[in-house]
């Protein structure tokens, strides 16, 4: 046995444990400068920060879409290593929602949902389809299951993308600026779905600029800047009484445009 | 003025200069059209085509073995009718599909017209004409049967049907070349349209997987694979096909153990395949470039392995984008088979040269070349039309 | 050891045990590359081994001495002086010059015709548009080789000779060749003249060259027309509207406003077409024009030096392609800079 697994998974063990993660891009850019983060089961952690602060890069290291050079990340008891089988195993447990939806345009909505569970989890197709329809009902687009993604609005597409991740029954969901590519009137419907998920106890890490969402839903807010974690605090404290000068400046900027 | 007249005036006589151009062009078209018609109906001696129709069709294939080619033609017609019917048996009501769309009626008309008119134009004997009618009838009958009763077939059987096509291809090879209790017919006796189609279909089928692999290699993150693919693609795209065929004919013998090279026909087929793969790779590469990087990331983050992600997510989209340029390459490949005549193979153009070397048909260049041009034009235009139809079928506002 | 990573006893978190190499994300890519490289090397070594063994057996090991031996064949039409006593390399050089002659004239001709055709497909005249479209569709769907033999055997070889030849001021087109006026005998301008039933002129081009050039231009022009059409179509419609609202005519708009912008798209497309014209010129052998390929074929038949001749041929054509690409890349840079 070569994979590294925690002895017993109890509710006390953290879902994500990232220690001193450092990343350099091949061009030498130091994207992450020793970032720590611990996410407990059922927590909703919101990561904020100006663009280029490394928050998306950091999020993407959790399911090995980005590699890192130093530090360690442990997801659901599995230590991220260079073991390809472990990377596959982690990706099955971690759902990811992208800014650009990344739905598969050549497949129908239903096929988008059933593809991975059937191929990866080897589950019977009929059973997966039933579950997929239930999920589509849950995100409020049950009647669109035979349409192609190109026929849906942006908000509908992002809800399909969330349902697609959920269909793999992940233990944790990562959201990479899920509402940034949406028209303002569609942001609400997506956030609504995310609120529902949080209420159901899903562990979530969300990179977003949505202050209201962070205030209401997050258990903790993390501010990143220049590849470092600047501040980490419960939302109430973060938004009303930040300790760092950098956080105050960021909040001033973001609250002007997003009161 | 009626709308038609107004439209004509706007399109053709908007300004005096425009009018002059129109009149000149009309005169040119009239004179050219008259000259061609005058030649085709009056001066041309079409006997050269009628007398050599078998030669143009199959070359010097032994007469007593030609029943095998008739059988193959019938099988191909049956397969065509069957696939056509099966494709239509699942009408997509959301796209206004029906069991018998208007295009299909036009195709039926074409098949009927060709099978009735062509054999008699070629002056075939009545029994031969009857065979062509029977083959056309078989095609249409299976089209009807498959369209009508196809949906009633059990699902596993339906899934197995596409496997019949590669089997049919292998069977065709056996029927043409012999083996399995059939008398062997040496490739040197293959010729005419049969050889043209054999060479081009062989190259098209085999260059496809090779081209896709090369395209993936060229876009790979692994430097060795990338550079290997680049060298291959640029080498085959940089050299004229005739020099590569020349290489195949003259150097292949030295490259294989014992100096034994395969039959000339197969040597040429392999060179065509390797050549076409390089061009196909470029077509597929442009398709791959059109698939956003996020697609692969989404597939990987759902837990799909890299091969799974490519076969189910990336390649289906890339090939759809690349389809028009891929068919363009296949059309070029069909045209490029004429170069085989320069290395002494008896495909259509090679056959034409031997026919015109016959003292009885000396100087009948125009008739022969004109016929070949019409034949090639029809095949290539049909491929182009087919590709556009397939594109529409595959592309129902599905791409975001 | 396929086991769900979330089940069963294992070392404590943080204690990373070594990852086996066949599952290591940094090692696997190199293993894959190594395997591919090894396969390629083995195949190449196999082929080269056979080549050397077979060539040794046939007594044909790679040498280039034969290039200096007298060729023993003649070339009917050359720019470089050549006869049967001169060595092979002079023959190959004469063939190369003949190839360059048809490629360069073909490039110029097909660019002119193709550009005109491409512009005509945006004409206001529906008949002209339709005719252009038809031309492109006809030419593109018929094999080039078939077109070349058609031009040669059907058109050029049925031209009349003697007094019946097609005569224009300074130009005569006969079955025996294309005769052009030019300077002869010092600095006198001399037109084609009929002497004893045979045309004479300062400049004579063979019908073989004429057929090849005509065929190549007619074929390549259709493709260039499509490139030009695509380039013009890529210029936003607003440019046409803006120019005509300033009072420019259709022709002025096209030349002064649209074409300069379209060049950005057109030049890379032209590069492809020019290279394919250079490669297609090797079909000269079908109409009896002695180009590089045709000399190489004769050379191979006489010397049996398959490997050397094939290497020379491939190397020369690759160099020619590279040269055209370099030129066109330079032109491309020029076009792009002028934009800014």
Image (tube, coloured by chain):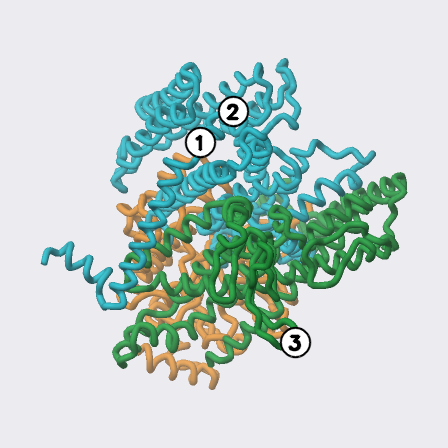
Chain colours: A orange, B cyan, C green
Res A31 visible:
no
Q: CA distance from mark 3 to mark 2?
A: 61 Å
Residue B184 or C171: which is nearer the viewer?
C171
* Residue C248, x across and y down, in percent: 29, 78
Chain assignment, label 2? B
Q: Secondary structure at mark 2?
A: helix
Residue B14 appears in the rendering = yes
The disc label shown at residue C186, or none: 3
Residue depicted at 10% across the width and 55% down the height: B2
Please state if B294 lies on the left or on the right of B339 as rendered: left
Residue lying at 27% horizontally and 65% vertically, measured from the top left: B18
Q: Residue C230, percent across and down?
A: 41, 62
A198 shown above or below B306: below
Tell me the distance, in whole angstroms, between the alpha carbons under discs 3 and 1: 53 Å
**Extreme residue toward the left, this view:** B1
Q: Residue at x 66, y 40 (%)?
A: B343
Numbered marks: total? 3
Q: Which residue is mark 1?
A: B46
Q: Are marks 3 and 2 on the same chain?
A: no
Residue B217 position in % (x across, y down): 62, 52
Q: Nearer the viewer, residue A255 or C140?
A: C140
Name the residue carrying label 2: B54
Rendered position, C195 above or below C146:
below
Asked if residue A186 lies left or right of residue B153, the reply is left
């Amino acid at each position: 046995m070569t994979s590294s697994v925690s002895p017993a998974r109890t509710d006390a063990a953290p879902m994500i444990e990232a220690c001193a993660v450092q990343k350099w891009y091949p061009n030498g850019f130091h994207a992450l400068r020793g970032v720590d983060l611990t996410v407990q089961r059922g927590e909703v952690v919101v990561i904020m920060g100006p663009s280029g602060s490394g928050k998306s890069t950091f999020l993407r290291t959790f399911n090995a879409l980005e590699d890192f050079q130093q530090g360690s990340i442990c997801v659901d008891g599995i230590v991220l290593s260079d073991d390809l089988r472990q990377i596959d195993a982690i990706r099955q447990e971690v759902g990811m929602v992208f800014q650009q939806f990344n739905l598969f345009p050549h497949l129908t909505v239903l096929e988008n949902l059933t593809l991975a569970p059937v191929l990866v989890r080897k589950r019977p197709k009929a059973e997966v389809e039933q579950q997929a329809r239930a999920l589509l009902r849950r995100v409020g687009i049950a009647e669109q299951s035979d349409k192609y993604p190109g026929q849906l609005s942006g908000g509908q597409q992002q809800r399909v993308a969330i349902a697609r991740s959920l269909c793999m029954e992940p233990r944790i969901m990562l959201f990479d600026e899920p509402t940034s590519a949406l028209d303002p009137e569609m942001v609400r419907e997506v956030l609504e779905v995310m609120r529902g998920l949080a209420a159901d106890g899903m562990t979530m890490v969300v990179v977003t600029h949505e202050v209201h969402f962070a205030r209401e839903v997050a258990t903790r807010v993390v501010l990143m800047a220049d590849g470092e974690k600047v501040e980490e605090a419960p939302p109430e404290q973060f938004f009303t009484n930040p300790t760092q000068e950098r956080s105050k400046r960021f909040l001033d900027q973001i609250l002007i445009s997003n009161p | 003025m009626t709308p038609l007249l107004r439209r004509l005036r706007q399109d053709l006589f908007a300004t005096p200069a425009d009018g002059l151009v129109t009149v000149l062009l009309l005169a040119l078209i009239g004179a050219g059209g008259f000259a061609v018609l005058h030649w085709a109906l009056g001066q041309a001696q079409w006997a050269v085509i009628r007398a050599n129709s078998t030669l143009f069709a199959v070359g010097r294939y032994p007469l007593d073995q030609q029943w095998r080619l008739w059988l193959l033609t019938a099988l191909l017609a049956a397969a065509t009718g069957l696939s056509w019917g099966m494709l239509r048996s699942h009408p997509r009501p959301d796209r206004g599909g029906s069991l018998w769309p208007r295009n299909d009626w036009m195709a039926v008309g074409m098949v009927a017209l060709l099978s009735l008119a062509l054999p008699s134009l070629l002056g075939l004997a009545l029994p031969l004409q009857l065979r062509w009618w029977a083959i056309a009838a078989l095609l249409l009958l299976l089209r009807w049967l498959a369209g009508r009763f196809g949906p009633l077939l059990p699902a596993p059987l339906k899934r197995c049907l596409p496997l019949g096509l590669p089997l049919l291809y292998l069977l065709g090879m056996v029927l043409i070349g012999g083996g399995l209790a059939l008398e062997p017919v040496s490739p040197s006796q293959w010729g005419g349209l049969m050889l043209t189609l054999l060479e081009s279909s062989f190259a098209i089928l085999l260059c496809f997987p090779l081209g896709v692999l090369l395209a993936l290699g060229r876009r790979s993150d692994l430097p060795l694979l990338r550079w290997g693919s680049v060298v291959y693609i640029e080498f085959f795209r940089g050299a004229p096909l005739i020099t590569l065929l020349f290489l195949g004919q003259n150097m292949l013998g030295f490259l294989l153990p014992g100096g034994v090279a395969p039959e000339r026909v197969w040597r040429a087929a392999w060179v065509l395949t390797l050549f076409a793969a390089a061009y196909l790779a470029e077509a597929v590469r442009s398709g791959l470039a059109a698939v956003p990087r996020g697609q692969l990331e989404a597939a990987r983050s759902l837990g799909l392995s890299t091969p799974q992600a490519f076969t189910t997510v990336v390649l289906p989209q890339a090939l759809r984008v690349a389809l028009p340029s891929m068919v363009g390459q296949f059309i070029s490949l069909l045209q490029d088979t004429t170069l085989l005549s320069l290395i002494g193979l008896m495909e259509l153009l090679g056959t034409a040269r031997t026919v015109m070397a016959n003292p009885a048909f000396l100087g009948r260049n125009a008739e022969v070349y004109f016929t070949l041009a019409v034949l090639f034009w029809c095949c290539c235009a049909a491929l182009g039309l087919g590709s556009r139809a397939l594109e529409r079928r595959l592309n129902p506002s599905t791409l975001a | 050891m396929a086991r769900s990573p979330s089940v069963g006893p294992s070392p404590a978190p943080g204690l990373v045990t070594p990852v086996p190499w066949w599952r290591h994300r940094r090692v696997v890519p190199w293993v894959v590359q190594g395997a591919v490289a090894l396969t390629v090397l083995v195949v190449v070594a196999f082929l080269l081994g056979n080549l050397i063994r077979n060539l040794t057996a046939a007594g044909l090991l790679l040498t280039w001495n034969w290039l200096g031996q007298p060729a023993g064949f003649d070339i009917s039409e050359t720019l470089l002086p050549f006869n049967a006593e001169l060595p092979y390399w002079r023959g190959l050089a004469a063939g190369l010059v003949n190839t360059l002659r048809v490629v360069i004239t073909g490039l110029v001709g097909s660019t002119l015709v193709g550009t005109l055709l491409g512009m005509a497909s945006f004409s206001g005249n529906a008949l002209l548009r339709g005719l252009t479209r038809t031309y492109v569709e006809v030419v593109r769907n018929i094999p080039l080789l078939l077109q070349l033999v058609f031009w040669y055997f059907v058109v050029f070889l049925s031209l009349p000779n003697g007094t019946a030849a097609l005569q224009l001021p300074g130009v005569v087109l006969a079955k025996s060749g294309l005769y052009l006026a030019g300077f002869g005998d010092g600095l006198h301008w001399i037109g084609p003249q009929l002497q004893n039933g045979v045309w004479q002129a300062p400049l004579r081009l063979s019908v073989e060259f004429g057929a090849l050039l005509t065929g190549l231009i007619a074929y390549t022009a259709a493709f260039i027309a499509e490139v030009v059409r695509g380039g013009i179509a890529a210029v936003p419609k607003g440019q046409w509207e803006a120019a005509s609202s300033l009072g420019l005519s259709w022709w002025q708009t096209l030349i002064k406003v649209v074409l300069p912008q379209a060049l950005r798209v057109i030049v890379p497309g032209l590069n492809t077409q020019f290279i394919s014209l250079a490669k297609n010129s090797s079909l000269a052998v079908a109409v009896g024009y002695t180009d590089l390929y045709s000399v190489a074929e004769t050379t191979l038949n006489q010397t049996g030096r398959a490997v050397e001749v094939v290497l020379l041929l491939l190397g020369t054509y690759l160099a020619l392609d590279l040269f055209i690409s370099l030129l066109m890349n330079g032109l491309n840079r020029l076009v792009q800079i002028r934009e800014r």
